[in-house]
Image (tube, rainbow, N blue to C red):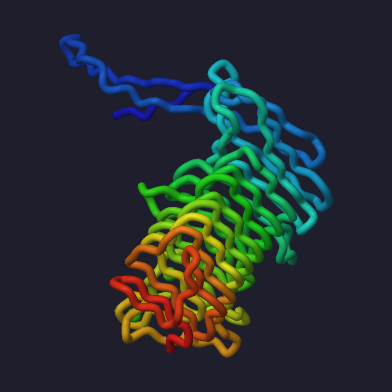
């Protein structure tokens, strides 16, 4: 087998390669299945210089890296200008807590746009990665990711697709007008010991959310098949139930008021509780997350719709009040496979 190398670097576009075998007698085989290769377009992002492109359905998209710091970056688009483009990756380097990234779009047969990946590599010595990711009409594509090695002050997105990952060392506010997650694959949001300040989302499905503390959590629709873990660290592998799980250091494990305008379905909400050896929250072997600072209180849980199981809401310390529909629940509340308890361990 002789390796084949293209003579010159390929221009952006999509290329198909097929293989035909020729024997000594000159017989030519049928062509193989095509190997399709897409060469992406890479666009530099300089602060203060917006980049414009047209996405696949004709929306005009503007990507803008702004404000201070030495932040620079690049953006990789798949497909060409003739078919329209999609953002496959945005990479930002040397950002600070003053840097902001904005993605806006107008028009197109499908409103808004989407991106598959955002990597924020903040400047050395900074703990803040970004002031603002303002993308109110951009969705994080299913299976997409946002990864920052520092904190992000505010994240505004249209939606977060199923199977996505958001990893940051603290998020002050997370505002998602549409849905977070989907039934097809687990969505993970990791907010480090600093946790999240305020969370406001359209709905939440099949999502694992881990942080040292949660401020207010407001959901316009339902929360289903999800886990909100305050104080309990799923670790750098962002997988629940592995060896690197434990306590966030210097985190309170508290949760502010959780308001769900829809229903709470098959979901676990934890403040400062450890699942114990069985790995399941709400069983007899549960423990307290062992950090000297963990308190693990929940200020209030207000569900405008109904609660269905298996659902567990457990606090190491107190739960201020629990209201479902118009009823105020007395704790501990145990009904079928629903368990709501304060001072759990
Ligand atoms: Ca883990
Ligand atoms: Ca357990």
Q: Quadrant of residue 314?
A: bottom left
Task: Residue at 62%, 42% (x, y): give it.
Answer: 90
Q: Residue furthest top?
A: 26
In which quadrant will I find the C terminus? Answer: bottom left
Q: Residue furthest front?
A: 326
Q: Quadrant of residue 213?
A: bottom right
Answer with the quadrant where ligand 2 appears in the image.
bottom left
| Residue 148 left/right relative to 265 | right
User: Where's residue 162, x and y in %?
Assistant: 44, 47
Task: Tally the numbered discs.
Answer: 0
User: Where's residue 184, x and y in %?
Assistant: 36, 47
Relative to 140, say whether 14 is above or below: above
User: Where's residue 93, x and y in %?
Assistant: 70, 50
Task: Residue at 58%, 63% (x, y): give it.
Answer: 217
| Residue 272 left/right relative to 242 | right
Q: Quadrant of residue 259?
A: bottom right
| Residue 297 left/right relative to 99 | left
Q: Nearer the viewer, residue 339 or 70?
A: 339
Task: Residue at 43%, 27% (x, y): give it.
Answer: 37
User: Where's residue 195, x and y in %?
Assistant: 61, 69
Q: Nearer the viewer, residue 199 or 190?
A: 199
Task: Residue at 59%, 69% (x, y): give it.
Answer: 257
């Amino acid at each position: 087998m002789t390796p084949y190398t293209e003579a010159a670097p390929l221009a952006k576009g999509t290329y198909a390669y097929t293989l035909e075998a020729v024997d000594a007698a000159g017989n030519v085989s049928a062509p193989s299945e095509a190997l399709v290769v897409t060469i992406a377009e890479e666009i530099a992002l300089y602060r203060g210089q917006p980049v414009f492109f047209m996405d696949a359905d004709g929306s005009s998209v503007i990507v803008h890296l702004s404000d201070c710091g030495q932040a620079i970056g690049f953006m990789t688009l798949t497909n060409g200008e003739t078919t329209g483009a999609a953002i496959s990756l945005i990479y930002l380097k040397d950002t600070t807590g003053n840097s902001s990234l904005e993605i806006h779009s107008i028009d197109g047969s499908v409103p808004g746009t989407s991106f598959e990946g955002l990597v924020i590599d903040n400047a050395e010595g900074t703990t803040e990665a970004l002031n603002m990711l303002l993308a109110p009409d951009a969705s994080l594509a299913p299976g997409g990711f946002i990864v920052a090695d520092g904190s992000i002050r505010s994240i505004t997105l249209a939606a977060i697709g199923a199977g996505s990952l958001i990893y940051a060392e603290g998020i002050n506010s997370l505002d998602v007008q549409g849905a977070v997650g989907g039934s097809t694959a687990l969505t993970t949001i990791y907010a480090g010991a600093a946790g999240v300040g305020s969370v406001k989302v359209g709905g939440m499905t099949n999502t694992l959310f881990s942080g040292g503390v949660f401020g207010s959590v407001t959901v316009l629709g339902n929360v289903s098949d999800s886990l909100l873990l305050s104080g309990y660290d799923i670790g750098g592998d962002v997988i629940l139930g592995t060896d690197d799980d434990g306590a966030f250091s210097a985190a309170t494990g508290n949760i502010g008021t959780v308001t769900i305008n829809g229903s709470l379905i098959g979901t676990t909400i934890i403040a400062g509780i450890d699942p114990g050896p069985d790995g399941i929250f709400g069983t007899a072997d549960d423990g307290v997350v062992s950090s000297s600072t963990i308190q693990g209180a929940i200020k209030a849980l207000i569900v405008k719709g109904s609660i269905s199981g298996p659902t567990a809401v457990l606090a190491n310390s107190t739960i201020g009040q629990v209201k479902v529909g118009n009823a105020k629940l007395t704790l501990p509340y145990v009904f079928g496979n629903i368990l709501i308890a304060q001072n759990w361990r």
